[in-house]
Image (cartoon, rainbow, N blue to C red):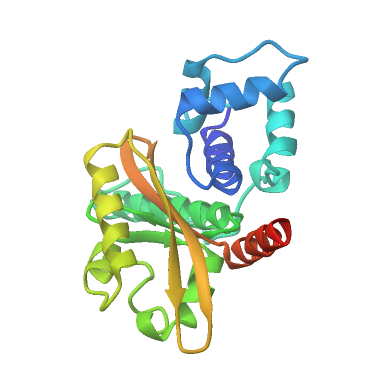
Amino acid sequence: MSQYLVDRFNLSFKAGLINRFGRIPPAEKFTIEFNFRNTPLAPINRETARQWIIGETLPNPMRLRLLINWLELDANFIFAMHIPDDSPPITLHQNAQDTRHLESYLLQKQERLGQAAINFVSPLTCILDKEGVIILVNTAWRASAKNDQKLKHCELACEGINYLATCDNAKNSDSAVKIAQFIRAVVQDNTKSFGAKYPCYTEKEKKWFEVKISSFEFRGDVCYVVTHMPITELLFNFDNMSVRLNS
């Protein structure tokens, strides 16, 4: 089995989990949800779910088909033969410079793979390292940040920027301070996850979002997922329904 295939599945799988749950769920919770839908086949255990989530194994064909349908995974991405890129020169006897070149190429290829996967995620999503520095953002996050004057049209909320510092330095924003606190709590204890609803008001409009923070492990490194889901319309519809029921 190709490790590249396992990596493609794992990245697409994580994107599907974020779309479905708003975060990377604990293995125990995912096991229950999966087995509820997996009635024709033998149930999985928590260890199997853990291995899928951290990218150690690939599900068998029947379970993979169920995951693709349930989580709406992109099968073309998972089974793609390659992602277009510039291949490094092939050398039979590598010197130190060749080795560094190959390591750089493999890192860039992994980043392109991760970028392709995270763009499948619907909510505004970014991946942080343990210091709070943004590693990747998806298309929805980048588009929103470019239109946000407070974020200097993406300068304060894209790759290479410390998102914790951006939240800490936000003026007159209790929500940003709380989000930074949530992120630090998850960094200190990777078993934790947080979610909260918060308002985002501007002179032109009033919006509401739901933020969720969780962590995941990939090849020994722990990363942190921050998603912001727009819920203004959902809250508006809920308020209207409440008014009708009470009238």
Q: In the rendered image of this protein, does residue 71 appear above or below residue 125? A: above
Q: Is residue 114 left or right of residue 149?
A: right
Q: In the rendered image of this protein, does residue 79 appear above or below residue 89? A: above
Residue 172, given in percent of the width and then of the height, sits at 27, 77
Q: Going 37% across and 36% down the picture, which residue do you hit? A: 219
Q: Can residue 59 be seen in the rendering of this structure?
A: no
Q: Residue furthest right?
A: 40
Q: Quadrant of residue 235?
A: bottom right
Count all numbered tags in the image, as a single digit.
0
Which part of the image, by quadrant, shows the N terminus? top right
Q: Residue furthest bottom?
A: 203
Q: Going 44% across and 82% down the picture, which residue do you hit? A: 148
Residue 152, given in percent of the width and then of the height, sits at 36, 84
Residue 127, given in percent of the width and then of the height, sits at 40, 54
Which part of the image, by quadrant, shows the C terminus? bottom right
Nearest to the observer: residue 51 or residue 31: 31
Q: Can residue 127 be seen in the rendering of this structure?
A: yes
Q: In the rendered image of this protein, does residue 30 appear above or below residue 17? A: above
Residue 165, given in percent of the width and then of the height, sits at 22, 67
Q: Is residue 242 left or right of residue 141?
A: right
Q: Residue furthest front?
A: 247
Nearest to the observer: residue 9 or residue 30: 30
Nearest to the observer: residue 81 or residue 187: 187
Nearest to the observer: residue 96 or residue 211: 211
Q: Going 51% across and 78% down the picture, which residue do you hit? A: 206
